[in-house]
Image (cartoon, helix red, strand yellow):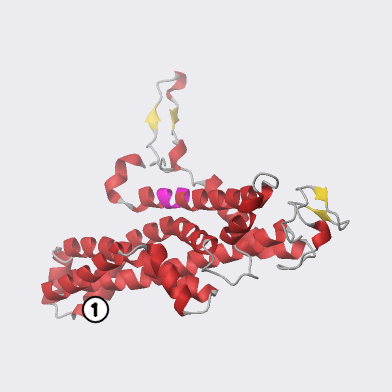
Amino acid sequence: MNDLTNAVSPPEQAGRPGGRIRSRRPVRRVLPWLPMAGVALLTVFAVVGPWLIPYGESQGSLQGRLAPPFRTGGDGAFHLLGTDQLGRDIFVRLAYGARVSLLVGVVGVALACLIGTAVGLLAGILNKSVDAVLMRGTDVALSIPGLLIAILLASIFTPSIVTVFVSVGLLLWPTYARLIRGEVLVLKNSDFVALARVAGCSTWKIIVRHLLPNVLPSIIVLATLQIGAAVVLEASISFLGVGLPPNKASWGSMIDQGRQYMSTSWWLTAIPGLFIFLAVMSFNALGDWARVRFDPRLEGHR
């Protein structure tokens, strides 16, 4: 995905009559308005959507089952995006599923960020023995299939949104640990860290006041990129039936429940799949923009 930012070029002499000076503003400098609009619309849809149509999340009518989008069902009610095999309104269930996806994306990524950042900072700044132990644990976490962890947690605990949070956090934290450790290994040999040690700063103070602010841009970029991954993970977990309870709406469970009707009722799987695609693309575009915006190694691409 192409980056969406570029530095503003300085005013230059255009060589036109009158010697007027014009400043050229490259397109890549502007904010990524399209993905920002996508995230904003998804958020508004999740918050306001369930209030726009007077149906409950699990409210259905067998008389109005499998009604196509923009049609009136057998129950005499109009359904904007149709109904599923139990007569539940697709629009309302999509809105509740958007709430789940956004919550999992924010809370799950935040949990992974906290765990991974702590491990990466400690592994990079402490002695080699601690580094070896923490990194071997990180390698083990990376080697375990992610969905296996989710199925294991679902078999131990009752399926709930908290279980999904923990699953996403445990799946994504190793990426933070490896990234932050690599940056800390470089930063701890810098002059400002050496001066802090000479001044008598403790290891904890060096981490909080000197290392953490310097790795924060990388944390923000990775978090933005991983929200899209968290949305896909939540959909995959729900698709397997080990995420939320069956009575709760989720984009992944909607696809799972509608796949047996794909040949006759395409909207049951196509519409939730389209929402997943739009959400992931929007968050990935924002993450790519943030990566170019904050990474000094990509200065020439701004």
Q: Is residue 96 left or right of residue 11?
A: right
**Residue drawn 60% across the image and 63% down it:** 250
215 inside magenta stretch: no
Q: Is residue 251 left or right of residue 220?
A: right
Q: Is residue 259 above or below residue 46?
A: above
Q: Residues within 10 Å of mark 1 (few under 14, many from 20)?
A: few
Q: Is residue 127 visible?
A: no
In the foreground, 195 or 211: 211
Q: Position of residue 267 (x, y in %)?
A: 68, 48
Amino acid tagged 1:
Lys
Residue corresponding to mark 1: 205
Which quadrant of the structure image shows residue 263?
top right
**Residue drawn 80% across the image and 65% down it:** 54
The secondary structure that dominates the magenta segment is: helix
Q: Is residue 126 above or below residue 78?
A: below
Q: Position of residue 284 (x, y in %)?
A: 45, 50
Q: Residue furthest top?
A: 17
Magenta region: 285-289
In the foreground, 157 or 283: 157
Q: Position of residue 248 (x, y in %)?
A: 63, 69
**Residue drawn 35% across the image and 67% down it:** 173
